[in-house]
Amino acid sequence: MDAVLPVRAIRDIRRRGRWRCSYPVEVVGAGPAADEDEARALVRAAQEALQGGDLEQALGALAAALEAGGCPDADELLGGLCYADDDFDGARTNWETAFRRHRDAGNLRAAARVAANLADLHGSALANRAVGNGWLARGLRCLEGQDRCVERGYLELAYVACDRPDVAEIERSAAVALELAIEFGDADLEARALGESGFALVSQGRSREGFARLDEAMAAITAGEVADLGVAGKTFCAMLSACDRAGDMRRAEEWTRVVADTVMDRYDGRPRVLHTHCRAAYGSVLCSVGRWSDAEAAMVEAIGPEASTFAFHRAETTIRLAELRLLQGRVDEAAVLLQPYEDRVAACAPLARLHAIRGENDVAAAVIRRGLRELVDDRLRRALLLSLLVEVELARGDLDGAARATAGLAETATGTDVPVVHADAALAEGRLAAARHDHAVAIEHYDDALRALRDDERPLLTGTILLERAEVSAGAGDTAAAVSEARAALAVFDRLGAARLADRGAALLRELGTATRYRPRPVGAALEGLTAREREVLELVREGLTNAEIGERLYISPKTAEHHVGRVLTKLGVRTRAEAAAVAAAGLEPARPSTRSGP
């Protein structure tokens, strides 16, 4: 009986130099392999099988190619399969061999393309940027004196976009690569260039234009027009990173589902790094729209023992988890998570917030300015840092510094079509006016900020604006408005689990001489508002079922189950599934399936 030949088994064959394959394999249409030409034919068969989603057949053909004595194409493909299997040592070994064999045979363009893979592997997966730069230089040297070629485009995009802080440079590199891809008819490079340029445009605040390019690239991938699995994975990473930056929950969910159906499921969860980045970026977007418990679960999974060891994504996910810990009031945990990554530009915002929480505002301002120096054209991340700088400068009592930061934020928002950036700019104007005791102007700006968020789901930012508007209303003597807005803000913070902001809202209400929260209804009264379907869902939540399992039990989609669970949490006035289960345990009789007569 033929065995399924795993990637790691092929890698072991390659490392030991034993070309006589001990695994019985069947290669359709291939005779006994005797020379390099035959090996190349087998590699082509492996590539065709991969494109068709037949991993076992591809591995069999590749094993036969190695048995024949191998060729640089076999080494290159094997490196790609090792990479997809999260075997980065195997990828390095085989790609280095492929580079040498291509170069020694005079195939300098092919060697340059392998060098681009090695640059990304070292620079991002293994966190050896100096080594990655060395391979990038080797690839460029291979092309010295060569005519225009598509391989130069692959070198332009050697590093994934989300690992490059200069988005203007990303856009320039992607433009060069796209021109070469179209000129030479390379569908893989075209998709990659569209994805990288789309990410750069979104980061610059041009989200409609950027997502149009990203959607185009993803459509090509899911239509099967992209042959290289690594290219597909990196392009999807660009899409997820753009969704993360812009907080685009709908697009992240939609493309994640489509890619799982058309790519990940075909290759048994490979590339593993793609699955891990999917969970990490999805978790970050969940955090921005206020689904913190789901966000935490996704990010913890993305850095867990079963996740990819890809260094860049693990670092970025840990930083995002630290941001969530700060929002939850778990400051010491956040500090531990951030410590190994304080040199990364992505850590500047949470690190500055950590220092601000500890009262170290001078250090917080210095961290923010370091981030601003690196993120020259990245309008979305600059806006976040400038908004935070306004808070820090006001805490330091430096109104002039706050005014400069506010002006910089307003300039950043100009020409940006991302609502949250305009909301941040209006909020900064409101904070500055409030610090100057100009209550009427401050309230106008807070209202502008709320209007900017009308169609954008940002509960934490909405709650923050409401709370600060309440504080200004209290200062202006409008107690009724202050109480109403503070209670609305407190409801948001309680629902999210934002402990520090909830305490601040409760303190304001106490100062206004009113109850911080309404007296909760008895458990029985809380359950009365649930529909029959919602009571069934709550019972399954109590049993510990996931949304997917609830959907399967009730014959509904996981998305519909998720909506039901969200409504149940809202009606019960709880934040988490665990709290809902506790309410259910206190007063819910087990739901019974409804019976009907007739057809």
Image (spheres, rainbow, N blue to C red):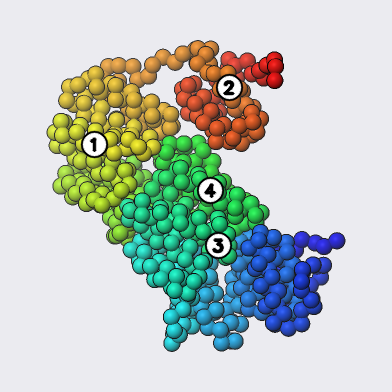
Q: Which residue is mark 4?
A: 256
Residue in the image at 55% along x and 46% along y: 257
Q: Quadrant of residue 441?
A: top left
Residue in the image at 58% along x and 86% along y: 104
> Does residue 542 show up?
no
* Rendered location of residue 329, percent (x, y): 41, 36
> Is residue 589 found left or right of 112 in the rendered image?
right
In this rendering, the label closer to the viewer, 2 or 1: 2
The answer to which of marks 1 and 3 sits earlier in the sequence is 3
Q: In which quadrant will I find the N terminus?
A: bottom right
Residue in the image at 38% along x and 29% along y: 492
| Residue type, label 3 | Glu
> Does residue 5 show up?
yes
The answer to which of marks 2 and 4 sits earlier in the sequence is 4
| Residue type, label 4 | Thr
| Residue type, label 2 | Arg
Number of residues whose C-alpha sits closer than 10 Å to that of mark 3, classed few (under 14), some (14–19) or many (20 or more):
some
Asked if the residue under mark 1 is in contact with the one under mark 2, i.e. CB atoms within 8 Å, the reply is no
Q: Which residue is mark 1?
A: 448
Query: Marks 2 and 3, how far apart in space?
Result: 43 Å
Q: Secondary structure at mark 1?
A: helix
